[in-house]
Image (spheres, rainbow, N blue to C red):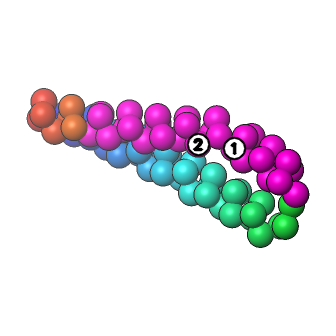
């Protein structure tokens, strides 16, 4: 079950990378001084990636826990 733990850790790190990307994207949009509508549009375009990254991170953590319990 060690392989499940390592795969889960890699999946979780990929999700974390996606979250960092989303944070940087919104931070740059806020610093750009966009109007309210443009800022809202940028944030809405990042939202599906953000939710996917959260899902990926949660699935990775579940894989790690299952690997630990089975190991």
Total marks shown come to: 2
**With respect to residue 57, does 26 lie above or below?**
below
Provide the residue span drawn in magenta: 35-64
Residue at figure coordinates x 26%, y 39% from the top left: 64
Does dot 2 land on a helix, a strand or a loop? Answer: helix
Where is residue 34? Give x, y as percent. 86, 60
User: Badge 1 is on which residue?
Assistant: 46
Say whether residue 29 is magenta: no
Horizontal and vertical percent position of residue 17 = 54, 53
Residue 50 sits in quarter: top right
Is disc 1 surrounded by few (<14), some (14 to 19) or many (20+) residues within 10 Å? Answer: some
Disc 2: CA contacts within 10 A as few (<14), some (14-19) or many (>=20): many
- What residue is shown with label 2? 50
Q: Is residue 60 depicted above or below 34 in this figure? A: above
C-alpha gap between disc 1 and disc 2:
6 Å
Image location (x, y in percent) of residue 49: 63, 39
Residue 66 location, quadrant: top left
């Amino acid at each position: 079950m060690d392989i499940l733990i390592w795969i889960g850790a890699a999946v979780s790190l990929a999700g974390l990378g996606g979250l960092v990307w989303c944070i940087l994207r919104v931070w740059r949009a806020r610093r750009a001084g966009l109007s309210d509508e443009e800022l809202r549009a940028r944030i809405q375009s990042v939202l599906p990636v953000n939710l996917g990254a959260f899902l990926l991170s949660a699935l990775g953590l579940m894989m790690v826990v299952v690997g630990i319990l089975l190991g």
